[in-house]
Image: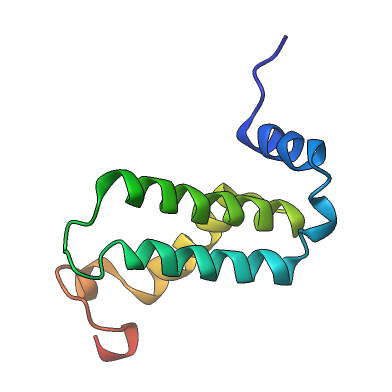
Amino acid sequence: MAEQTLRDLLRAFAAEREWEQFHTPANLAKSISIESAELLECFQWSEEGDGERVKEELADVLTYAYFLADRIGSTPESLIREKLKKTAEKYPIELARGKSAKYDQL
């Protein structure tokens, strides 16, 4: 039997619980924001945060991001590759190396 992909595991997890009905793009985007806030809360009073809690909250953010990518007919990998190409054009190495300025300020 072939190894399940992460997408397959997530789809099965949601299907077993009949949660697909709740996985609208809007609901998933809201969930990403909520979980991102919980991730940020890990660093509220400490620059390092609680390592285990950071991992758990980051996993929640990534899970909802994977669900949303799947719902819109894409994959996180393809979305990241497409965005990275655009970002590379906005931030050429010779202008952006070592700088945190926004592209229009380089």
Q: How is the image coloured?
A: rainbow
The quadrant of the picture occupied by the C terminus is bottom left
Q: Position of residue 94 (x, y in %)?
A: 21, 70
Residue 102 placement, left or right of 82: left
Can residue 73 be seen in the rendering of this structure?
Answer: no
Comparing 31 with 3, the one in front is 31
Residue at the farthest top position: 1
Q: Residue at x 57, y 49 (%)?
A: 63
Residue 106 placement, left or right of 89: left
Can residue 20 be seen in the rendering of this structure?
Answer: yes
Tag count in the figure?
A: 0
Relative to residue 76, is residue 86 depicted above or below? below
Q: Residue at x 45, y 61 (%)?
A: 84
Q: Position of residue 61 (x, y in %)?
A: 50, 56
Q: Position of residue 4 (x, y in %)?
A: 67, 24
Q: Position of residue 69 (x, y in %)?
A: 66, 55
Write down the quadrant of residue 100 in the picture: bottom left
Relative to residue 10, is residue 44 depicted above or below? below
The quadrant of the picture occupied by the N terminus is top right
Write down the quadrant of residue 3 in the picture: top right
Q: Residue at x 17, y 64 (%)?
A: 46
Q: Residue at x 79, y 41 (%)?
A: 17
Residue 84 placement, left or right of 42: right
Relative to residue 18, is residue 46 depicted above or below? below
Relative to residue 80, is residue 9 depicted above or below? above
Residue at the farthest bottom position: 105
